[in-house]
Amino acid sequence: MEKTFRNYDPLDVTSAVREHYRKMRQHQTLDYVRGMHKKYLTFDKPMPLWEAMEHLNSLIDVSDPDLDLPNVQHLIQSAEAIREDNRPDWMQLTGLIHDLGKVMYLWGSDEDGTSQAEQWGMVGDVFVVGCALPDTCVYPEFNTLNPDMKDKRYNTPSGIYEEGCGLDKLNLAWGHDEYLYQVLENHKENKLPEEAMTMIRYHSFYPWHTGGSYTELLNEKDQDYLEIIRDFNRYDLYTKSNTIYDLEAIKDYYQPIAEKYLGNGPIYW
Ligand code: FE
Ligand code: FE
């Protein structure tokens, strides 16, 4: 039987996935997101890349209905599929690190939704805060639970944003995409191309890249972003399997690429 991905049907999916999305929709408001930026974007915790990878050995993403392996396995599976297709080295590295922002669980809390137990501020499809929630969100029935949807400033299609302002001006729900993007933006040795940074920042933004929502906020540049994300997402989604890799064994191949684009020093989280 052919495997289907991203099936959120209540009859198939665990209640943990649904519960995750209910809490995410309920707690991720514009105020919350602003608070998380202040709290987490401090860049004062040095940790080498490979140590961060190892920490994802102890994290299973509760929002993912397709995979119940430690997250580091998903990262290696994505990277290896990109490598298999002979795609550029920077893209292979991007596959390897794209979910590394989940290390925030090391300094996260249940209250912020950034812990092992509470992951609603860390993983799952993201949406824009500060404007209306579209019905392309998974479980759109939870949209009304978001307190911002009762606020006139925030519940219109463009909300606090100028029409056509473009993706880069929007505030997305807080999670591992934005965290890693900001950490790498701040990383002085970062030489990853812009496309890689786009893949990292927007890969969880399903209501836009797959749902086709937020048209009033987009600009021309976002059309290019869309192509970049769609290219990357095939590897993020369709490579999920039960193949287990050994992190130590793949290091030999990826270490020189990591060094080329991220340098030798630690990354400041
Ligand atoms: Fe991700
Ligand atoms: Fe991923």
Image: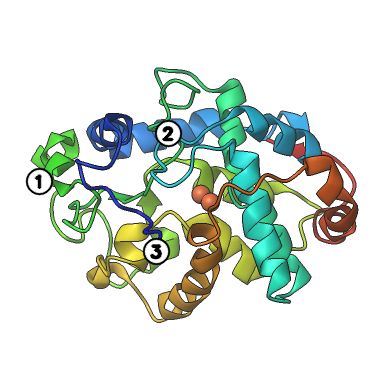
Q: Is residue 185 visible?
A: no
Residue with the mark numbered 3: 2
Determine which of the numbered discs, if any, sits on residue 152 in the image.
1
Residue 59 locus on image (x, y percent)? 57, 30
Residue 249 locus on image (x, y percent)? 85, 46
Point out the tag, 1 or 2, that comes first from the N-terminus: 2
Amino acid type of disc 1? Lys
Q: Residue at x 59, y 48 (%)?
A: 74
Q: Is residue 172 above or below residue 14?
A: below
Q: CA distance from mark 3 to mark 1?
A: 45 Å
Q: Secondary structure at mark 3?
A: loop
Amino acid type of disc 2? Val
Point out the tag, 3 or 1, that comes first from the N-terminus: 3
Which is in the foreground here, disc 1 or disc 2?
2
Residue with the mark numbered 2: 62
Q: Residue at x 44, y 20 (%)?
A: 117
Q: For disc 3, does the CB lie below 8 Å from ligand 2?
A: no
Which is in the foreground here, disc 3 or disc 2?
3
Q: Verify CB contact (< 8 Å) between mark 3 and mark 1.
A: no
In the rendered image, the quadrant that contains the N terminus is: bottom left
Q: Is residue 30 left or right of residue 231?
A: left
Q: Residue at x 28, y 59 (%)?
A: 161
